[in-house]
DNA sequence: TTGTACGCGTTATCAA
DNA sequence: TTGATAACGCGTACAA
């Protein structure tokens, strides 16, 4: 129709006609149907975001960053929540696929173990960028913090303050952050020549109750066998650990130091304030969204892993003076 | 095609044929195209959410509630952020309309003053449910807390603790929560026979820096003309106010009590812990999503305003003993 | 400058 | 039981 031309400001339409059309369109509240357009071009200008968790302050920060970029690039965001359940995650992804999103931003659920599903999606040509909790080496770009080095830094900070008996509440090993934070911890300990006791490595999820439960395990050790410091795989896990320690009538950091990962809004405010690794969520969201849109819009955008630098935020939970 | 019938489990298809079709579909990674289906039925199974703000912990809680309901009802969520800018809000809504969302969940931006735009949308038959920051009386359902009564409760709590010189950092009057919290404050003061000084009513936005600025205005009053307590329209505003008070080398609650609205995650953790009104965000999200989906799926769902009950959370920021 | 035909993927309807 | 046709709204390509 001429109508289409008029509304889309094409050149070959009489100015008179255009005015009539545009006026009529406005008066009837015409809204172009992107669904039809999407069908025609097999391009929807939508992006699916798969979050494992919605309340932990880190993810809203990431979403804010994503939203900012996506908004400027005129895409729309489908938000889904796997609630740390990989069946629900798969389900969400299938629905997003059905809605023909142009690409996916994924942070894995902690129960995700089967990466062949991701591989299939990538092989089919669906642009995917992982953020924070990544699966590397399967052809999708990853935006993450330098987990390994951050973990080394954190561990060495404790060591330089005289701690040797250090435990780690580590995350699921199928997930990058779980694996690398454990790796960094081990390397720092080995380099410094300190023992990594098996019973001081306790598996944990990523959430506050996971931390509480894991800490309980450590507290079951006889006092002389307990560690003097605990590195939690995330801040919520650290919060849970601190609760468990307090419930055992011990104090942080005097009886046991605790440190975390992510600089949750609560980290600075709890008692004692938590030493942690500052993870720039907003920036991570922006970088991930940019990378995904670049991947969508160009066919030779390289697959790469981008590491965002973190910083160590020292607060009271790790003590200030040397201990033995 | 027979293919369509086979995949959708229709009865009139040979079991043999079905097996072949389903097997082939699986092997080629077939995903039903909802875009095409949407075009055909003018029904997308998508819902647009318009948030004024993404980081303040209240909204992620709401989104979590929305997501939970929407997920169970098999809808998908478009998330947009107006960033408190009404031009951006309008823009977001137009885009969502273009994507033919089945309905909208809106919490107004603080700069929204022109409600005729909403009216037009509603008149055109687009299902809308407002939450938290509502526009009532224009034909859309609203899910909110009992702002007026909550404000009365909060004010009377201060009064019963001996405060009379009470100021209010009030929100934009075009937004329901701004208007009703101010109304509740005034009623409680009048009923108790205390004076509402003009210079103790300071307009503020909803965010932390708005609170800081508004509090600065109060602090410019000579000490003997200052209030002894301040009711902030939101918790972030209360945080800003507390910062301003501290920057003026005064203390909370001894020099001035401060109370807020929403029970932000930070409220319990700051110094001093903030007395506030607990606003159940998760429940609000669920109720809003349910109401919207009911409105979408039935044509005689009543338009109503649902008030969710709050509770007063008393912490240290309002003092514990009587003052004069 | 304007209009017509076609196809994107789906399903309802009717014919084979 | 299966196949053919039309329609949802849009834009490209080509004809008038």
Image (cartoon, coloured by chain):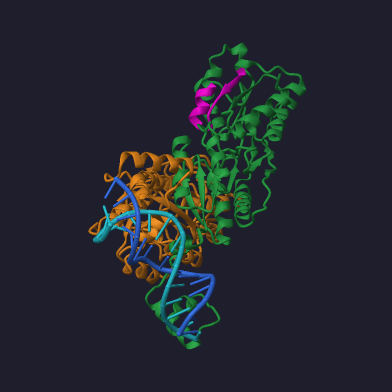
Chain colours: A green, B orange, C cyan, D blue
Front-most of A49 and B5?
B5
Front-most of B10 and B297?
B10
Magenta region, residue range: A200-215
Quadrant housing the N terminus of chain A: bottom left
- Which quarter of the figure has residue A274? top right
Question: Measuring 53% from the left and 31% from the top, which residue is drawn there?
Answer: A113
Question: Measuring 41% from the left and 41% from the top, which residue is drawn there?
Answer: B314
Q: Is residue B296 left or right of residue A92?
A: left
- Which quarter of the figure has residue B187? bottom left
Front-most of A93 and B9?
B9
Where is residue B222 drawn, in percent x and y?
Answer: 55, 60
In the rendered image of this protein, does residue B88 appear above or below residue B45? below
Front-most of A108 and A238?
A108
- Which quarter of the figure has residue B134? bottom left
Q: Is residue A205 magenta?
A: yes
Q: Is residue B301 magenta?
A: no
Where is residue B200 drawn, in percent x and y?
Answer: 46, 61
Where is residue B208 drawn, in percent x and y?
Answer: 54, 54
Q: Is residue A60 visible?
A: yes
Where is residue A276 drawn, in percent x and y?
Answer: 63, 35
Q: Is residue A322 visible?
A: no
Quadrant housing the C terminus of chain A: top right
User: Looking at the image, which residue sits at the far bottom?
Assistant: A16
């Amino acid at each position: 129709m001429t109508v289409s031309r008029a509304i889309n400001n094409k050149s070959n339409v009489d100015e008179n006609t255009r005015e009539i059309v545009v006026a009529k369109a406005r008066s009837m509240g015409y809204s172009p149907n992107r669904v039809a357009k999407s069908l025609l071009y097999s391009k929807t200008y939508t992006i699916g975001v798969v979050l494992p968790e919605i309340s932990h302050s880190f993810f809203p920060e990431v979403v804010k960053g994503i939203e900012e970029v996506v908004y400027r690039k005129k895409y729309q965001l489908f938000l889904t929540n796997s609630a740390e359940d990989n069946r629900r995650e798969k389900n969400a992804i299938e629905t997003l696929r059905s809605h023909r999103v142009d690409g996916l931003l994924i942070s894995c659920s902690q129960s995700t173990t089967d990466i062949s599903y991701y591989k299939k999606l990538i092989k089919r040509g669906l642009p995917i960028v992982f953020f924070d909790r990544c699966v590397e080496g399967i052809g999708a770009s990853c935006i993450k913090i330098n987990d390994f080095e951050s973990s080394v830094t954190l561990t060495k900070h404790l060591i330089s303050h005289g701690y040797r008996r250090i435990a780690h509440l580590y995350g699921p090993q199928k997930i990058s952050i779980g694996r690398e934070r454990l790796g960094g911890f081990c390397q720092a300990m080995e380099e410094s020549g300190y023992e990594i006791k098996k019973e001081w490595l306790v598996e944990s999820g990523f959430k506050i109750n996971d931390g509480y439960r894991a800490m309980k395990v450590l507290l079951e050790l006889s006092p002389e066998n307990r560690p003097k410091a605990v590195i939690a795989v995330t801040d919520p896990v650290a919060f849970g650990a601190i609760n468990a320690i307090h419930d055992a009538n011990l104090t942080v950091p005097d009886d046991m130091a605790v440190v975390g990962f992510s600089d949750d809004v609560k980290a600075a405010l709890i008692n004692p304030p938590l030493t942690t690794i500052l993870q720039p969520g907003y920036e991570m969201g922006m970088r991930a969204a940019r990378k995904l849109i670049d991947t969508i819009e160009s066919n030779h955008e390289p697959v790469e892993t981008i590491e965002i630098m973190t910083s160590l935020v020292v607060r009271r939970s790790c003590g200030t003076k040397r201990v033995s």
